[in-house]
Amino acid sequence: MGQKMIVLPESIKEKLKTHIVTKSFYITDIGYYPNANYHFRTRKKGADEFILIYCVQGQGKIKIAGEQIILLPNHFVVIPKKTAHEYRADQFNPWSIYWMHFDGIIAQNIFDRYRLNPNKYEIVPVDGNRIDQFNQIFRILSSDYVMPRLEYANILGLNFLTSFVFLEIDRVLQINNRIDLVDNIIDFLMKNLDKSLKSDDIAKEFNYSPSYLFNLFKKRTGYSLIHFFNLKKSQKACEYLSYTDLSIKEISYNMGFQDPLYFSRLFKRYIGISPKAYKIKQGG
């Protein structure tokens, strides 16, 4: 129930193999087998194409050139072409798998990159976008074989495959991007200490949801966005108290607070003493 697959006709494969856009990478077969009880395949001479198998539920065993792999949920494997292999769903907990046969000029290079990745058996993070992309590829390949649509389907297929093969690189880049995002937020806050900003204002500035930025920012800095913002306001107020003759009311306004009493309470919460006591302590 729910099983689906497409095997492209030989005539279409020949077109893909020579077409300027698709000859580098093209899909020959694609499918999804949910709860695939009794699913078993043996190819003593291997397949004519490379095979991606992505397990989302259950488990199964794969043997490639004598090496056995237990494929668990959110794991994937790429089987090299023309290489003896066999695979089967687990008898008691059969797998649900998305799979794709592919070939092309760069297929071997992509497989080589996969083979050299020491983390290739790590968990693939659950990503609904990845499954949506697979379904889009499947819909295109099941509808018609007009060349522009085939070009698009295979470009999507390459993206789908590389989202697995380059998973570790993508993970590092995402981490770096998140770090850059936090740095950019801090820079934005420091440039706007004179303003009264809420979490929604900051989220809107960076085009993210407030909850996402809250969790990301707190994980990196240990503070919530507004807690950090008010801390920096209080620290800046220390500079005014130490090096200017501005009154506490004037400093309050400079820090974006219309209520000097609220500013004083906030200052004491972060610095430990009132603005007046701090100024006296600094000799002012």
Image (tube, rainbow, N blue to C red):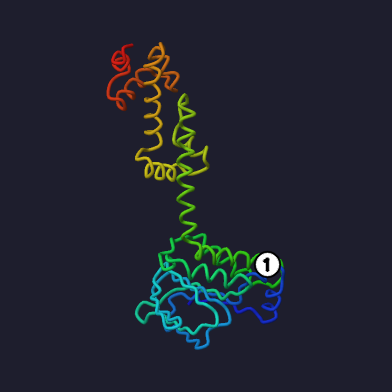
Identify which residue is drawn at 40% across, 74% down: 71
Residue 230 image point, x, y percent: 38, 29
- Residue 177 location (% of width, % of height): 49, 48
For residue 86, above or below residue 139: below
Above-or-below relation of 47 to 241: below
In the picture provided, is 175 more to the left or to the right than 7? Answer: left
Determine whether 211 is above or below 241 in the image: below
Identity, as a three-letter code, of the amino acid under mark 1: Glu
Which residue is disc 1 drawn over? 151
Identify the residue at image location x=59%, y=72%.
Answer: 107
Q: Is residue 111 left or right of residue 150?
A: left
263 or 275, nearer to the observer: 275
- The part of the image, by quadrant, that contains residue 260 is top left
Residue closest to the far bottom: 44
> How far across and down, in percent of the image, does residue 79 sit?
50, 77
Q: Which residue is depicted at the point 38% across and 14% down?
A: 248
State left or right for residue 28 relative to residue 90. Answer: right
